[in-house]
Amino acid sequence: MSHYELRCRECGRTWGNQPRSICDECFSPLEVAYDYDSLRGSNGSALTRERIAQRPPNMWRYSELLPLPQGFQPRLPVGFTPLFQAPQLAARLTGTTAAAANLYIKNDAVCLPTLSFKDRVVAVALANAREFGFDTVSCSSTGNLANAVAAHAAREGLKAWIFIPSDLEPAKILGTNVFGAKVVRIAGNYDQVNRLCSQVADEHRWGFVNVNLRPYYAEGSKTFGFEIAEQLGWRLPDNVVCPMAGGSLITKIKKAFDELIKLGLVEPKEVKFFGAQATGCSPISTAIKTGTSEIEPQKPATIARSLAIGNPADGHYAIKTIKGSGGWSEDVSDPEVIDAIRLVAETEGVFTETAGGVTVGCAGKLYRQDRILPEETTVLCITGNGLKTTDVLAGVYQTERPIAPKLAEFEQYLQKTLDVADIREIVGAAEEAASVGA
Ligand SMILES: *Cc1c(COP(=O)(O)O)cnc(C)c1O
Ligand SMILES: [Zn+2]
C-alpha cells in the first residue's frame, strides 16, 4: 500500500494512483494526499530533521513527502539550490539598511540540470510516468518546462514530444532540441498550445507532465518550500514573494510549509504569500487587486514569457493562498522587469531570467507599499536563469569599439572612461540639486 493517493480538491473523492488530473464526479482538480500519521511513526521510522540532514543535498532528501513509487531510485541530483542573504539588494529595494539581514534569495537559477525550478516538478512527474508504463512523455510549455522534460527524458531513456508557442526565446527552443526531443512549434499562445495538448492526451497514451500527470508534477514544487525552511535553520520566513504563471508553485510552497508544521519539523507560523506577475499577463494579480476570487483570462503581451499564461490552471487556488495568508499580489511592466534583472545582478551577482525580474520588481513595490516591512524575514523566489532570456537585454549594453592590444591604448581608453564617469557624476549631482530646488 502506498502512503499517498489522488484526492479531489473539492468533493474529496479518492482516485488511487493513476494518470489523471480531474475528478469525474465534480470536474475539479485532483491533488496528492498523504497519510501523515505513517510519517509521524512511533517505531523509529518518523521523518526527523536529523534523518533528513544525513541525506545527500538534493530534493530527494524529502522523498517521504513526495509521490514516489515503491523502490524508486533517483537518477539525477536535482535541487538543493542556494539560499542566501541579499543585503545590497535589500538596501536598494527599501532605501534603508534595516532589511539587510532579513532579505533572502532562493536561487533556482542554478537548479540542475536545466537551470530552473521546473527540474523539480519534472523529476517527480517522470518518476510516475515510468510507473504508469509510458514510454513517451510530453508537455505544453512556456519554455523552462520544455527544457526540463527534454533533459530528464533523455536521462531516463524516454521519448519526449514538446509543444511550445512558436515565438519562444531561441535559447529555450535550442535548450530543448539539444536533448533530442521532438519539438512541435504551434502558431499560437501558451493557452492555445495547452488546449491542444489536452486533446492530444485523449488520443495518445503519453504521459503529459502538466496534463494527466499534473497532480504528481505539482508536488515537486514543494521541495522549493522544504529547502527554504531547512536552509533558514528549520524556521519559516515571514513573507515569500513568488512569481506566478499557472499559479501552482505558490500554492505548493504553502503546502510544503503546512506539511512541515504538521510533522513537527518547524514551529507553526503564519507566512504571508505575495504573488508576482508581469503587467502584460497578470490575471491572478488583477483578481487580487480587484477583490474577485475568479480569474478573468487575459491575452499575454509581455517579455516575461515563462510567466505568460493568460488562463492559469491553479489561479483560483493561488488567489486563495494569497488572500488566506494576508498577502497581496503585484505586477510590473516590461521596462521594470529589465531594471530589476539588472539590479539583482549588480547588487548580488545573480543573473535571473525575466521571471526573476518580475519577482524582484514586485518585491520593490511591496516594500514601498509597506506590505512587506524591512524587519521581516522575506524570501524572494528566483526561479530561472538569465542566460535563457538574453534577448530582452539586447540594446541595453552597447558594444564598445575594440582597442589594440597595447598598454598605451588601454591607458587612453581608461582615462576616457573615467572622464565620462566624472561628467556623469557632475551632471547627476546638478540634476539632483535642480530637482530638490524645484
Ligand atoms: C513555470 C515558471 C514559474 C511559475 O510556475 P507556476 O507553478 O506555473 O505558477 C515561475 N518561474 C519560472 C522561471 C517558470 O518557468
Ligand atoms: Zn470531485
Image (spheres, rainbow, N blue to C red):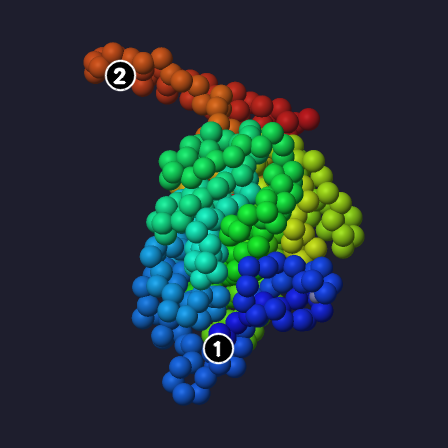
Left or right of residue 46: residue 25: right
In the rendered image of this protein, does residue 164 appear above or below residue 211? above
Q: Which residue lies furthest to the bottom in this view?
A: 43
**Disc count in the image?**
2
On the image, numbered disc 2 is attached to which residue?
A: 410
User: Hey, which quadrant is residue 305 in on the image?
Assistant: top right
- State which tag comes first along the sequence, 1 or 2: 1
Q: How crowded is mark 1: few (under 14 residues within 10 Å), some or many (20 or more)?
A: few
Left or right of residue 311: residue 111: left
Q: What type is the residue that disc 1 sits on?
A: Met
Left or right of residue 244: residue 418: left
Task: Please identify, in this view, whether the residue under mark 1 or under mark 2 is nearer the observer.
Answer: 1
Q: Which mark is residue 31?
A: none
Q: Distance between the residues labelled 1 and 2?
A: 71 Å
Residue at position x 68%, y 26% in the image: 438
Residue at position x 37%, y 69% in the image: 71
Q: For the residue labelled by badge 1, is the local secondary structure a helix, a strand or a loop?
A: loop
In the rendered image of this protein, does residue 379 appear above or below residue 151? below
Residue at position x 76%, y 52% in the image: 294
Residue at position x 45%, y 58% in the image: 133
Is residue 382 among the parts visible in the rendering? no
In the rendered image of this protein, does residue 203 appear above or below residue 254? above
Residue 301 position within the rendered picture, expressed as x and y whole percent measured from the top left? 65, 32
In the rendered image of this protein, does residue 93 appear above or below residue 400? below
Q: For the residue labelled by badge 2, is the local secondary structure a helix, a strand or a loop?
A: helix
On the image, numbered disc 1 is attached to which residue?
A: 1
Q: Residue furthest left?
A: 406
Residue 56 position within the rendered picture, expressed as x and y whole percent measured from the top left? 32, 64
Is residue 401 among the parts visible in the rendering? yes
